[in-house]
Image: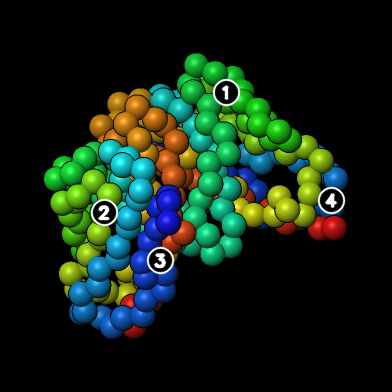
Amino acid sequence: KQEVTQIPAALSVPEGENLVLNCSFTDSAIYNLQWFRQDPGKGLTSLLLIQSSQREQTSGRLNASLDKSSGRSTLYIAASQPGDSATYLCAVRRVNNNAGNMLTFGGGTRLMVKP
Amino acid sequence: DAGITQSPRYKITETGRQVTLMCHQTWSHSYMFWYRQDLGHGLRLIYYSAAADITDKGEVPDGYVVSRSKTENFPLTLESATRSQTSVYFCASRGDGQETQYFGPGTRLLVL
């Protein structure tokens, strides 16, 4: 059974700092990995999706990397801003998955960026 | 409204009552999903649907029933609510051939 772990569970940083969020998964036979953002009381918004054949994806100040063999992904946020405060979740899709791309989610990292 | 919506946004009910959570999407996405989010468990898939009249179980289906008579709607019913079903429920959808899932705003359910 795939298990996804995110460390740390919570993180507080001053504005402007570069930071890294970590995601690890136990089964390396993944189809892709996604990073989501969740604001309090809101749904999830997809940030980046990395296919299993890719090493990284970038969107603005966000960069996500994937090392499938070691079962790890990182989300790098450059020059953090208070508006980046949210919970960040990673989710993996298994290769042999008939559940319409059933995702297995990590528990999330709750990020607070202080002005 | 365009996108994916859920109703109600908040619901309080009692043990043993039947509750239906609604999900509606305007994109004509083939796939729809129901998740529950709990502290310590993250998001877990309850049921999903690949198309109208096609549904299947996810990771935690017990105590839930779904239907999909129309592509745009995917209601989730708790036939006899239990306290353990207190949670935040998210509906999501994705288009056929797409990878990204789009999530609704969630329904907070409290079972007393």
Question: What chain letter is assigned to the residue under label 4?
Answer: A
Q: Which amino acid does label 3 sit on?
A: Thr
* Residue located at (84% from left, 52% from top): A14
**Observer-nearest of A52 and B91:** B91
Q: What residue type is labelled 2?
A: Asn
**Observer-nearest of B2 and B7:** B2
Disc assigned to residue B107: 3
Q: What residue type is labelled 1?
A: Asp
Numbered disc in front, either 1 or 4: 4
Disc assigned to residue A67: 1
In the image, taking residue B76 as reference, residue A48 lies left or right, namely: right
Q: What residue does disc 4 label? A: A15
Residue A9 image position (x, y, % from top left): 62, 53
Question: What chain letter is assigned to the residue under label 2?
Answer: B
Q: Quadrant of the C terminus of chain B?
A: bottom left
Give above or below for A30 relative to B73: above
Q: What residue type is labelled 4?
A: Glu
* Residue located at (14% from left, 45% from top): B53
Mark 2: secondary structure: loop
Q: Distance between the residues labelled 2 and 1?
A: 38 Å
Q: Say if residue A92 shows up in the picture.
A: yes
Check whether the beta carbons of the residues at disc 4 and disc 2 lie within 8 A of each other: no
* Residue located at (40% from left, 66% from top): B107
Question: What chain letter is assigned to the residue under label 3?
Answer: B
Check whether the beta carbons of the residues at disc 2 and disc 1 lie within 8 A of each other: no
Mark 4: secondary structure: loop
Mark 1 surroundings within 10 Å by alpha-carbon count, few (fewer than 14), some (14 through 19), many (20 or more): some
Q: What residue does disc 2 label? A: B73
Mark 3: secondary structure: strand
* Residue located at (58% from left, 62% from top): A40
